Amino acid sequence: MKYLRRPPLIASLPPLQRRGFMKLLGVALAVPGIPFAVRHAARAIALGEAKAEDMAKPPINFIEIDLRDQWDFGHVFVAPGLATAANLKRGDSGRMCAMYYGADQLKQIAERRVYLTPLSLPLEPHLDTIAMIETCELGIGEIHGHEASNPQRSPGRSPMPGPGRGDMSANEPVPYVPGNQQHYSSTPTPAALHNHFIKQQGLAVKNGIAFKGISREHTAYHYGAGLEGSELDRKQTVAALLAGFPDKVEDYNVVPTPQQAEALVKVLSAADDRFLQRHKYEAQASAQHLAQLGELSPLLYQGEPKLISLPLTPEEVAYWQAGCPDQEGNPPGEKCNIWEQCAYAYKLIQGAQCATVALEFDYLDWHDTRPQSIVDTLALQTVQPLTRLIESLKAAGLYDNTLIAIYTLDGGRAPAAGSAGGEGKSGLMLAGGMIQGGYYGDVGVAGDDGDGHVYSYSAPDPATGAPMAPVTDNSGRLAGGHVWRTVMKALGVPDSLAASFPDTAGYAPLDWMLRA
């Protein structure tokens, strides 16, 4: 069969069917294992070659998780310098190190510079796509670094207003209170910019949401910087969240019968050798594409319409809750635990209800001594929801085009158990099919100090990712602009947009953290 230049298949469909066709074609061509050549060819035949070029990559979903009140990843990925330190003085007070697992209890994954504790072992199957940095730029909040903005989320944010710098708290239900530090910025926060970008693509999804799940008056600012369609819908309670996404029946069928689905596959199969060769695709693609396209038929016709329902079933509760400690001070029926928030985020993404979901969570407001029970709890509240998000997104075929970004908003916390914020570590985790997994930078021991240690911090080199020379003060941290540009690149935001803000233009993405 020769490849013929014919009008795109979508032109032959009634207008009311075209939206459903576009939606299901995207789902169908996301079947794992289908070569890129076949995806391109099928889109070209169904939609036209110009449209196929525009759809080379699917839009990226975004789940942003904002953690407050001095969150510590110390028992998730242990910094190599601490994991290998000799004669580490461990304990829950003073300058002792609040890392309670010895070298014989850690599992090393050398090629990724990752050391797992017994609590973080569930992440092991996914380490190729999980990255951590603990030496990001520190917070500047007046109360030991507490702030609701964070330099990784809005580079250049400042307590001082100025031209082009808006009030980041202006659209928040709980604006400035002590601990939320009033800040002004010209740079949109990640979920807000992603919400704007998704709408610019014309995707038929609801507005992105921010669930205000922190149990106190503390919050996370989501700031659109005046961009059209950037502002998220803030949900203060579970009831408000569920009311925003009521149950509905969704008909995902492109065609009304399985027979028509088979006929459509035959049309798509017209991507013959000449088409593939003309676009210089690998030879084996032409031998595989008929078999691969055969997998599309059951996706084009999926049977009876499906119920999309956000409330968690008993089975879902059992899956997401297992092994994850609850939030302290959680008002019943208003806020919800981190595992519940992640379950809702997954269902919103999986059901194509929205593409941008921001979550906010705190465990408790903790200071001074740091017993193992607290550090263990923070690890479990990080590891268990993240593992289940990744597992669920992979099972749904969505992980490769979903980015999960976990930010610790508040001022840093040293490994010293008696530190109270404003020094030490400021953590970030990124996960998704586009992320190059590993632990970047380092935290170590520079010497003894009373009952514990002086700690050192090595940020990753922005150009290479290798740890830079260690420091023992708050200098030399990885600038928030690099982190912000990396997240934008991972989300597919064009460089022209990402570099258009005064405080991001001078920074480059961390390409060593991204898969080619």
Image (spheres, rainbow, N blue to C red):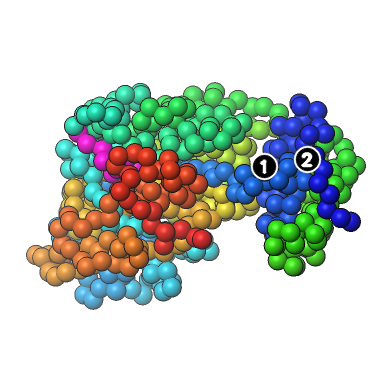
Residue at mark 2: 8
Q: Which residue does the image show at 50% across and 64% down from the upper left?
A: 128
111 is higher (above) or lower (below) than 51: below
Q: Which residue does the image show at 37% across and 44% down from the upper left?
A: 499
Report the magenta residues as a range. Answer: 150-159
Q: Are marks 2 and 1 in contact (CB under 8 Å)?
A: yes
49 is higher (above) or lower (below) than 415: above
Residue 26: percent from left, percent from top: 68, 44
Residue 204: percent from left, percent from top: 61, 31
Q: Quadrant of residue 21?
A: top right
Residue at mark 1: 51
Kindly state the secondary structure of the residue where label 2 is placed.
Answer: loop
Q: Report whether residue 35 is seen.
A: yes
Q: Is residue 286 left or right of residue 209?
A: right
20 vs 177, nearest the viewer: 20
Q: Which residue does the image show at 12% across and 69% down from the upper left?
A: 448
Residue 244: percent from left, percent from top: 54, 24
Would you call the spot at circle 1 few (<14 residues within 10 Å), some (14-19), or many (20 or more)?
some
Kindly state the secondary structure of the residue where label 1 is placed.
Answer: helix
Q: Report whether residue 238 is seen.
A: no
Q: Which residue does the image show at 34% across and 62% down from the upper left?
A: 463
23 vs 272, nearest the viewer: 272
Quadrant location, the N terminus: bottom right
Q: How many marks?
A: 2
In primary-sequence order, the first of circles 2 and 1 is: 2
Secondary structure mostly taken by the magenta-highlighted segment of the chain: loop
Residue 307: percent from left, percent from top: 70, 32
Q: Is residue 465 left or right of residue 160?
A: right
259 vs 7, nearest the viewer: 7
